[in-house]
Image: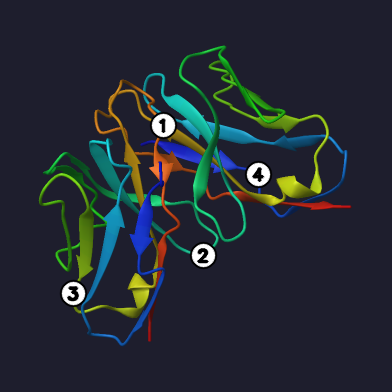
Amino acid sequence: GNSVTQMEGPVTLSEEAFLTINCTYTATGYPSLFWYVQYPGEGLQLLLKATKADDKGSNKGFEATYRKETTSFHLEKGSVQVSDSAVYFCALIPRDNYGQNFVFGPGTRLSVLP
Amino acid sequence: DTGVSQNPRHKITKRGQNVTFRCDPISEHNRLYWYRQTLGQGPEFLTYFQNEAQLEKSRLLSDRFSAERPKGSFSTLEIQRTEQGDSAMYLCASSLELGRGDTQYFGPGTRLTVL
């Protein structure tokens, strides 16, 4: 079946630290891959996405590269800010899923301290 | 663009009662999705509509759950004879079908607590 595994949180970093949140997936074929972010009290927001192997998604200083050989889509940011504190969800849409409903990972909570 | 809205934001009910949630998608979006999220977990897909047609339902959607989108605009999710295990955040999302990987926009969710 299709599944997404993320590193367990919470992750606590100091401001301006480097961030990596690992994400690996299991899926048939080549899924589309996404990172969503949920800020406190708000709904899920798309952060970035990649729809084919070797694509790099980027937004707001965050990046993730679709690695087919390692079935991974790790999220990185070079210098985090306090405002990046949120829960980050890695997700996929299977290739054969016409409805395009997501399979989400469990989420990783990030806390950035000033 | 007012985004996806959901009402109510919070619902507390007693076991055995029926509850209904409403989702208003972004106006031009033809696809609407329902997800359920429990504490510490990612959202799990429940069902989705394309216009007024309900095209897919997850095995998570027991016969106590029913969803409608009568005119292809807003949608309702009803849970009959609620159980404590139904306590969760119910999320709605909408998208405009453009192709594979089109963005889903999520609402703030309705938090259900079953006592």
- Would you say the residues marked 4 and 2 are in contact, meaning their CB atoms lie under 8 Å apart? no
Which chain is indicated by disc 2?
A: B
In the rendered structure, the answer to whether residue B62 lies left or right of residue A51 reads: left
Circle 1 is placed at which residue position? B103
Circle 3 is placed at which residue position? B80
The 10 Å Cα crowd at callout 1, few under 14, some 14 to 19, many 20 or more, is some
Amino acid carrying label 3: it is Gln
- Quadrant for residue B13, please give it: bottom left
Q: For the residues tagged 3 and 1, is the chain the same?
A: yes
In the rendered structure, the answer to whether residue A29 lies left or right of residue B58 reads: right
Camera-nearest residue between A26 and B82: B82
Circle 2 is placed at which residue position? B39
The 10 Å Cα crowd at callout 2, few under 14, some 14 to 19, many 20 or more, is few
Q: What is the C-alpha distance between the residues marked 3 and 2?
A: 22 Å
Q: What is the C-alpha distance between the residues marked 3 and 4?
A: 36 Å
Quick one: SS at disc 2? loop
Q: Residue at x 43, y 52 (%)?
A: B43
Amino acid carrying label 2: it is Leu
Which chain is indicated by disc 4?
A: A
Q: Which numbered disc flags the more N-terminal residue, 1 or 2?
A: 2
The 10 Å Cα crowd at callout 3, few under 14, some 14 to 19, many 20 or more, is some
User: Eyeballing the image, is B67 above or below B3?
Assistant: below
